[in-house]
Each structure stands twice: as C-alpha cells, then as structure tokens.
Image: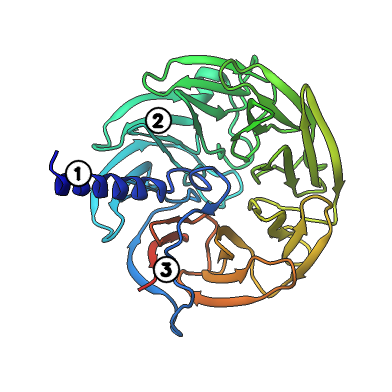
Amino acid sequence: MHLLARIATLNLLVAATTVFAADWPQYLGPTRNATYAGNDLADNWPKEGPALLWQKKVGSGWAGPVVAGGKVLLFHRVASQEIVECLDALTGKEHWRQAFPTAYVDGFGFDNGPRATPCVADGRIFVLGANGNLHALDFTTGKPLWSVDARADFGAEKGYFGFGSSPLVEGKLLLVNLGGKDGAGIVAFDTTSGKFEWKTNDEEASYSSPVAATLGGARHVFFFTRHHLVSVDPSSGKPRFTFPWGPKMQASVSAAVPVVSGDTVFISAGYGAGAAALRVQPGGVEKLWSGEDQLTAQYVTPVLRDGFLYGFEGRVDTGPKPELRCVELATGKVRWSTDKVAHGGILLAGRSVLITTDRGELVRVVAEPAGFQETGRAQILGFEGRAQPALANGLLFARDKGKLVAVDLRRK
C-alpha cells in the first residue's frame, strides 16, 4: 500500500477508535462508573456558561439519554406510547423513532414515563419500559427485533414506581434485574434472538442497575435485589455470593449502583441502609466498614477518583436537604461536605465532578479531598430534572421533564 494511503487509513482507524471510546452507550457510561475518559473539555466556561448546541421538547420519563456512533438515543413517553428516538448528536435532527404502546400508570402520580436508561451494544438498542416490556431494536433503523413481557412471561411486579433497572450487556447476554417469580429475579437473554438463557434469585427487583467487573480473575455482575447485594457469574447465572443489604423501611427502594475499585465494592442506599465498603474474596465478602453517617445515596450513584468518593448524602424527599460529600473509600472518613450544590446527577471528568442538579443547573466542582471548590455554574434546564446525564465527545446531554439539551463543553 502506498505510504500516504497507509497513513490516511491509520488516521481513519484512530479517529474511529476515538469516537467509539468517547461514546456513552449505557447508564453511567461505557464502564458504568459515570466516568468520562476524554481529555477534550474546556478548563474554563464563559461567564454566561457553556454554549447550548440545541434543545428539543421531549415527553415524560426519567430515562437518561445515551450516545453511540454520533447518535443520541432517548427513551420517553408521549400520550400512550413509549418512544425510542434516535437523534443526531451535533444537530438534534431526528433519524428515526420507534413507538411501543403502554398502559403504565404511576401509583403515586409522579410520572408515567420510562425510568430505565437504554443500553446500546453490537448494533442493537435495549430498553425496559415502566410496565416491564423489554424491547430490542436495530441501532441503524430502529426496527424492533424481539420483545419480552416481564410481567406476563416471568410474573414480575412493577414495584413502587414501575420497572426502573437499566439493562446490562455482558458478552452476548442481556442481563436484567426483573424481580420475577419462580427464581426469575435476575434473568439473562441472548442479545441476538431474545432467547431465555438463565435465571437466578427469588427476590423482587430494586431500582439499582447491575454493574460488571473482574475481581481476582473472576467475572462478577453485581445486582441489588430488594434485600441483598448479589454477585453472579454472568456465563451461568450461578451466584458467587449474597450479602444482606437494603433499606430498613418496607416502603423504600435501593437505586444507586455499586461502585467497584480493585477488590473493593462500595454500596449505599437511603431509608436507613447507609453505606458500606466490602472486600470481595473467593466465596464471599469481608466488610471493611459500614455506617449511616458517611454517604447515604438515595438514588444517585457516587463517582470515585483516586480513592475518594463524591456523592450526595441524604434523602431528597424528606429531612435536611442532601449534601455533596467527599468520602475516603478505604475508611469511610468524610473529608468535606457542603449544601451549596443542589442534589442531581453526577459525572466525573478528569479532576472535575460535573453535577446536573434537580433545579436544572450544571455545576462543576474540583474532585479533590482537600476541600470543596466550585469552578463553574450555569442554568441549562428547568426545575424538574432527575435523569442521569450523558457525556460523549465533549458534549453533555441532559434532560428535565420537558426538554433535552446538548451543551458544548469542548475546548475551542
């Protein structure tokens, strides 16, 4: 091959790899730890805040956006349909949309839209609706590929707020925290055909999403069920261990995702559960520390940098307002705490913690244990936000109850 052609080909491969590496294809990002791997973000924002690329009116729901291959996928509800919509990441232009009928009604009157964030893998999109309808779609066209009804097929209950655990792709399997009957608490499906592969556990589902990690040479997928942290071997569904854990109130849910670092797993939940750090060992776990005064995450997953967790302590719906905290993972020691940032979704990007608050602000905080330091704040949404944001190729995608925005955080 001619030298210039080889160089051009190499450049294209590098560019393609860069785009792929910067995707945010599932809940909490590529490795489900809410961490952005890119180094293209601006060090400082303009006085008026970062630039708004585009915005779009959206339907109801708390499902966050995901990004893959230059496309944004949004799962929301309009009238009696749950809609998967594919948009151009740079312009917001619609490429396709696919609608599925739904009759879900929130028993508390909060919101009737989907809660679980889509997952994109191997040219397919997987979504779990609020009423327990699991769908696989073709990424390019939006064509439905297969579907499963969790309530009819597995006897699963919708829980307090509908189905809300975001699916996870592990190899060729789609793993879902369904909470079904007869050992179908956790279920695996073939991603291509939707064929049932295995099931395990008898508990109801939580609102936490599963996360996969390799510890001590063994592959684990960690699930919060109603009352336990459960680790399973994803290839077979065989439990590796269970650890009693969960809120102390019956009318409660666990929603934050376990945070994995080395052989340590950090778990947290509201409603009296508190937090704990566990060391995973062959055949079980050792509790390093636990308590209710460190970092009680009601539903937003903390982020981890250099051995320190950054997350919100306290409940949103009752009691003192939540505080943003820095907590040492190894000991549970609180390094700093502040009420200067409203509760919201959290991302880690380099040395910055990015928070999209429930009040519609975007706040940037330095990820350092020495003390709280805010370095930027801008109003990007309305006052009713709860969905976890996505960050891909320097663009932040966030939504509230009525709109989706794309905000440019890149260096100029």
Residue located beneath label 3 in the image: 409
Q: Position of residue 112 (x, y in %)?
A: 49, 47
3 vs 1, front mark: 1
Please, which residue is most extreme toward the bottom here?
Answer: 47
Which residue occupies 50% across, 18% down? Answer: 153
Gap between marks 2 and 1 measured at Cα? 42 Å
The correct choice, above or below, for 183 with respect to 166 in the image is: above
Q: Residues within 10 Å of mark 3 (few under 14, many from 20)?
A: many
Mark 3–mark 1 distance (CA, rounded to whole Å): 33 Å
Give residue 69's position: percent from left, percent from top.
Answer: 31, 46
Residue ID for mark 2: 135
Quarter of the figure with residue 239: top right
Q: Which residue is mark 1?
A: 6
Closer to the camera, 307 or 6? 6
User: Residue 194 in the image: x percent, y percent?
Assistant: 41, 20
The answer to whether 263 appears left or right of 356 in the picture is right
Instruction: Kindly indicate the quadrant of the structure image that contains residue 179.
Output: top right
Q: Using the rendered image of the protein, determine whether residue 133 is visible from the camera's viewpoint.
A: yes
Do the CB atoms of the residues marked 2 and 3 lie less than 8 Å apart? no
Left or right of residue 225: residue 143: left
